[in-house]
Image: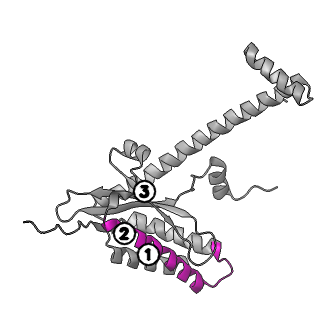
Amino acid sequence: MTSPQPPRAWSVRFTPHATDEALEAAARWAELNAPETSGEERQQRALAWYAGMEAAAGTLATNPRRFAVRERESRLLGLQVHALLHRHTAGGGGGGAYHAFYQVEDDTPDVPRVTILHVRHAARRPLTRAEAREIQTGPNEP
Amino acid sequence: MTAITLHLPDDKAARLRARAEASGEDPDAFAAGFAVAAVLRALDEEDQEDEDDAQLADTVAGIRRGLADVAAGRLLTLDEARERFEAGLAVRLK
């Protein structure tokens, strides 16, 4: 008779790159949703945003493949990438939806690992040339 | 103003004319409106495809930067990531 297997667990890691993107996303969210508040209040809001993202990432320690593989990105990269969708709704204001792109590795030397690679707003689009030019030169005079 | 000539198969032209007559509009103006709408829709779809492609490229570039961290062994535990976040936030929102 065999004893039941303990549930499998993956260690969850962030890359510095993804952490910095989460920082920028949280800071921008706090600034946009609470522009009249103090710096300390915005920090608290950003920390709450991050706590939500961290908690969502933490759930990937079990069953990390429950979020679908991103087919187009995976095809271009030549490896399987999943995307967790995080919606921040606490603290009022439109929380917005954010994607955390991650990789699941079962064959690492120590324990299986989930790595958060990239964090971005789900609706974020790249700058247009005109927007990039405006940032470089300042807004056009009317 | 750009002039647009509309070429339609006979059956579709007849349906368009019938629809224009039913609505009491001049068939030529009605058809021109349809043509413009179709062209604008096609251009919108083209813009959307361009935007989707640009967004995909941007996402892939972001993931590649994360993979470069992995390749260099730069990985943070959840506690380490939070410490980095909090330290950065104190500077970013001071």
Residue at the image position 67 percent from the left and 77 percent from the top: A35
Q: How many marks?
A: 3
Q: Could you tell me if the residues under marks 1 and 2 are in contact, i.e. CB atoms within 8 Å?
A: no
Residue at the image position 35 percent from the left and 74 percent from the top: B78
Residue type at mark 1: give it: Phe
Percent coordinates x, y for residue A77 in the rendering: 37, 45
Q: Identify the residue at the far top of this view.
A: B10
Given residues B56 and A128, the one toward you in this image is: B56
Q: Is residue B88 above or below residue B62?
A: below
Q: What distance separates the C-alpha of mark 3 from that of mark 1?
A: 21 Å
The tag on residue A59 is 2
Q: How is the image coloured?
A: one colour
Disc 1: CA contacts within 10 A as few (<14), some (14-19) or many (>=20): many
Q: Quadrant of residue B39?
A: top right
Q: Going from the N terminus, do you reach mark 3 or mark 2 first?
A: 2
- Does residue B20 appear left or right of residue B13 in this picture? right
Can you identify the residue that label 1 sits on?
Answer: B85
- Does residue A8 appear left or right of residue A64 in this picture? left
Q: Is residue B30 above or below residue A56?
A: above
The tag on residue A83 is 3
Q: Is residue A86 above or below residue A71?
A: below
